Image (spheres, helix red, strand yellow):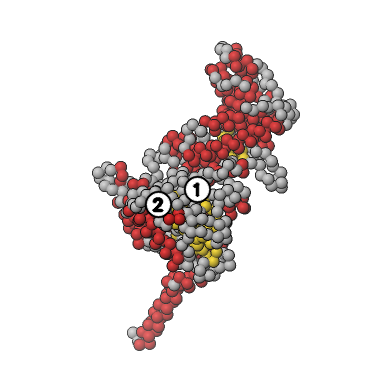
Amino acid sequence: MSTLVRLGLVAFSAGVAALVVALAMPYTDPRSLAALANHPIGAKLLNLSTSALHSFARLLEGVSPSVSVPSLHHYHPLSANVSEAVRTTTFPGAIASGDLDWADQRVWQLQQNQVTSPFYTEDELSRLLHWCGRSSSNNRDIGSPAVNSSSDVSSTATMLGREAPSSEEMAVKARFDRLARWVAASGGDASKVQLGVDGDGLRGLHANCSIEAGEVVLAVPLKVGLSAATFRAAQVLAGPTSAWRSIESADMFLDALVVSYEVAVHGDRSPWADYLCLLPRSYEGLPVHISDPWVASLLSELPALRRLAAKRRAQLALFANDLARPALMALPGGRSAMLRLARNGGDRAAGSSAGRDLWLPLWHWAYAAMKTRGVTLAAEGVQHGDGGAQLQLRLPLSMLDWVQEYGVLLPILDMANHAFEGRGANVAYQLLPDASGTGLAAALVALRPLSPGEPLLFDYVSSAELEEGPACLDRWLVEYGFVPSTAGSDPARDCDTFEVTATDIARAVVRTATSEPLTGTALMEMTAALEHQIAERLSRRAKDGLPARLEIHVRQPYEDEQSGTQDHVAQRWAVLQWLKAALWDPAHEDGRAPEPGSEFEQPVNGAKDCTHGGKGEEQHEERTSFSLDLVNPRSVLNTLLQGRWEQLGEFEHRAVEGLLAVAAAGRRAVRRALDQESKRQGTYGVS
Ligand SMILES: C[S@@+](CC[C@H](N)C(=O)[O-])C[C@H]1O[C@@H](n2cnc3c(N)ncnc32)[C@H](O)[C@@H]1O
């Protein structure tokens, strides 16, 4: 080969090498990578190349690109009946919202049948967080005493009577102090706060000195927060999560992946190791994690909660198996971490029940931690800087261009408990520039002068509620795992949802007509016959988009004059139309039957007689010929509300904490609706 050709080849190789280096360089320097990712074309190129690289890697692993994209349909226990479920979506107020019906009672039951053990246990968490060196902690665990032993914190903790803190308490204090130093070194300030326990035994954040109104009590720079933008594999997250972009609400599960990764892969080497050790080991209130069959059966009577929990449960399963597990394995160190999780379950050969793979327990616990403690930041604000400051986060965020909201776990700040604004909140959550002036810090600002030892309470949702109005309390249980005890009830947060089927309508009709309790074979027979008729009418009306069952939502009427609705029963008009369709023969709709606005008319054909409980074919005939067309939908609605009010009353004797609070709030809402119906109709007295 001539020298010239050799030289040419060397020059060509050098050129190729230079090109490769030029292409690879941005990936090695976070700043140039961030600059590139913030450019619209650069971000697209990065997205494309990381997705392509990831797909290539999967091909090498033998995963065919034609493997179908995972979908929530696979986790809907009745998905074979999807087309039937779709039918229920078109009518206003119909149960399903989307193409899968999560409200169907059978969905929750079937899911529940598969739950044979708790989603995670404290013992499993002890194994996952073995480096923390202690056995348990939860919100009410006093493994977290007031960590400042100064004498002016007497109102802080129930622990102060103790002379010497236990070794566990010392360990908690040491971890908290290390976190405070990390926050300070990162440009924040945690010098005015300490861990404490309130009078109910609830762990929280307390002031440790006197604080003026308007003073910043705590500032935690966002870069200290644990999030998809900051965790240790942030820069390579886009590829392994590229399949997530087409899945509804995928960003909600990104945070659980982040926590799982830090625990499984980095453990005590994680910058958040101290923080992870201070997290509660159990989050008992989240409906999605109900494993006790008795509690699950209570949830069945709260359809709004049940529907949300059923869907969330399916989403968690979809992500755990098909999306988060492969994503974690594709992140650096993920594959061996996953193997460790599988092994950490103990000795399977010995048939130990403690031997399950720890991945699912970790996943569910991580989800619970993020859900109950994370703050969310709009992706828009994160990418373009909020409050006038450009964020310094390591991840070129536009690479995750499908994310709308980032969840962030903020060490120390997330120890503060909740109180509604104007109802006990003494600090406000704000985003402020951090000490460097180039990034943001999440801050708690005093709303009034604070004394040493006072618990710091802020409103978890005030900014969200500004836009959407007050959230119903049942929503709190699903999203935050607890129902805040407010000073007196706030009518705007009292809501109830209950389900009405042909059976419920039949019972209400009998009750409306007879005002006698539903007892005896004769009444049962009559109800069954009515139910049959009602179900038939509804199924005939299915072609008009009328669902076979309806959720009735009861809440404070919106103040908004524009909407023009002032009914405690949401979409009352539509509900009455549906009841009318269930009760009245379509042939009678040309004015032959009473309109919903007209007064209740007594049923004919001896409906009253049915309460006498006689037997025989003749009477049965008479009863089943009861004329539904003459029953007024308004009176049935009234009876349904009355029945619901009584049903919720029974919760008082059997429900567990969170569900009891939801049921009580629902009962107050239904009471208001009943009063409104009673006033409107004048003639109906309700007890
Ligand atoms: C952000 S954490 C607050 C700190 C937490 N207490 C701890 O020990 O780590 C939110 C959790 O604290 C509890 N919590 C906060 N505010 C509460 C309140 N007002 N009433 C009851 N529980 C509350 C709930 O369990 C909630 O899921």
Residue at image location 42% in from the left, 53% down from the top: 146
Residue at image location 60% in from the left, 37% down from the top: 669
Q: Is mark 1 within 8 Å of ligand 1?
A: yes
Q: Is mark 2 within 8 Å of ligand 1?
A: yes
Which of the pair 343/474 is nearer the observer?
474
- Quarter of the image where one finds residue 9: bottom left
Q: Quadrant of the N terminus?
A: bottom left
Numbered circles on residues, count: 2
Q: Earlier in the sequence, mark 2 or mark 1?
A: 2
Residue where numbered disc 2 is placed: 144
> Tag 2, which secondary structure?
loop
Mark 2 and mark 1: Cα distance apart in space: 21 Å
Task: Name the residue at the front extreme.
Answer: 151
Point out residue 565 in the picture as x, y percentages from the top left corner.
69, 42
Residue where numbered disc 1 is placed: 480
> Tag 1, which secondary structure?
helix
Residue at image location 40% in from the left, 52% down from the top: 144
Is residue 103 visible in the rendered structure shown here? Answer: no
- Amino acid at the residue labelled 1: Tyr
- Amino acid at the residue labelled 2: Ser
